Image: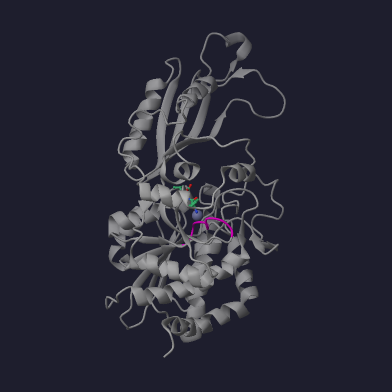
Amino acid sequence: MPSLAANAATRVAPALALIAQERRRILEELGQLVAIPSISTRPESAGDVRACAEWLAAHLAAMGMTHTQVIATGGHPIVISEWRDSEPKPALLIYGHYDVQPPEPLEPWLSPPFVATVRENRVYGRGTTDDKGQLFIHLKAMEACLRASASLPVHVRLVLEGEEEIGSPSLAAFLQGKKEWLRSDLAVISDTPFFAAGIPSICYGLRGTVYMEVEVTGPATDLHSGSHGGAVHNPIQALAEMIAQLHDARGRVAIPGFYDGVRPLSQKERNGFRALPWSDRKYAQELGVPRLHGEAGFTTLERLWARPTLECHGIGGGYTEAGSKTIIPARAAAKISMRIVPGQRPERIAQLFAKHVRRIAPSAVRVSVQCLHASAAALTPLESPGMEAAVAAMSAGFGRRPVMQREGGSIPVATHLKSLLGMDTVLLGFGLPDENAHAPNEFLDLGNFFGGMATAIHFYHELANTLHAKGD
Ligand code: BES
Ligand code: ZN
């Protein structure tokens, strides 16, 4: 009698063969998707974001998906689509995001950000790893199954968001309104990296994000610094003084109450992190920093994945053009976000930040604080049928059992799916840690791109085995 593994291999083989034959076409299509500059944070790009949603909807319809719609929200649209037949099968929700970060700074790019360019077995371009390339892995995996056998082993609902990179402001309302349609046995997201090149991983935890903006205003207009310097507080200096007080000397966030409720890492988890092949020295070298820096008392992986942090992303104000100008600026502003972990509530953290900043504000300036977006951390239980399927699929797709890891980034939908729908999310990511996500020269490794498709095909089949069909 043929083994279970051999049976599984026979079932996926035709779809895998189709992918192997169609690599060139698949890359050309990815190029079309990358060419649409769907930059969600930039108001003037709204038309491009919509065009990208329309492109995806047309592509899904052509693949044989049904119920495809571009759904308007208060912000950028959400694309939904589904595939199902009349057989009882488990239901899988696949989420991806088609919006991208701005490409700037442009100068360091070796090829234009919106022209997908293949070099050294990598495809370069904004969104190639985050997340157009990774969502496309699922589209092409499903397409191959549908072409090979006119069917999928699971019922699929697909949600493609256009606002993930700006904190998913329209997502909760959309999920609320579509609860019944969305309800599935499991969700899968491919928007995270491997632990390292050649070391596939399943990610079971993400940090949340609380994003704040602080504005400091001083005099009603810019002032001559010779005439007025010495008489008024400079908003840039006031802001710098405040930012400098947000951490203490041990690298901890100095906001009172910030760490309240933070769930400590279990010894088992700490051991799990320690077992991963990691070198601080190598990491510092790769990043180009003289040494690492952070909260005392924790290893680097603990600080990255399971400890809350605070970062300043940008400070604006005053004169920064060529040459010199002598002013006391009328205003200065900073963008600051906090990564939060299980046990911290985003709304509470935003309140604590605002209260603290107002308290430490020098009295000779005015300070206003605003929260731009906030989402909680997400954890997926390690022992579940979805995780088992993910491990088996990664092992089949890449010939190596994946390691278990957490990540420091955020994907707001994962938290919402748990809190609104009670659904767990498997983070089945195919990126690499050095793929320059959000930075110049973003790329996706082509081995991971096509290996990802094989893994996704295995994953759908594994799920059909491990999850009990609910007659959906
Ligand atoms: N792909 C990332 C999430 C990610 C980053 C996962 C690094 C694992 C490691 C995602 O597109 C992203 O950048 N999300 C934003 C969300 C934020 C705006 C709420 C992030 O993490 O900054
Ligand atoms: Zn992403």
Q: Nearer the viewer, residue 43 or 449?
A: 449
Q: How many numbered circles does the render carry?
A: 0
Where's residue 380, x and y in %? 36, 57
Q: Is residue 5 above or below residue 73?
A: below
* Residue 396 visible: yes
| Magenta highlight range | 190-197
Residue 65's spot in the image, x, y percent?
44, 76
Identify whether 160 is placed above or below 247. Answer: below
**Residue 64 % position (x, y):** 46, 79
Identify the main secondary structure in magenta. Answer: loop
Reply yes or no: does residue 96 show up in magenta: no
Looking at the picture, tell me which residue is in the foreground, 86 or 249.
Answer: 249
Residue 175: x and y in percent read: 33, 58
- Quadrant of residue 328 within the rendered picture: top right
- 100 or 399, nearer to the observer: 399
In which quadrant of the rendered image does the N terminus lie? Answer: bottom left
Of all residues, the one furthest to the bottom in this rendering is 1
Location of the C terminus (image quadrant): bottom left
Q: Can the viewer see residue 410 in this picture?
A: no
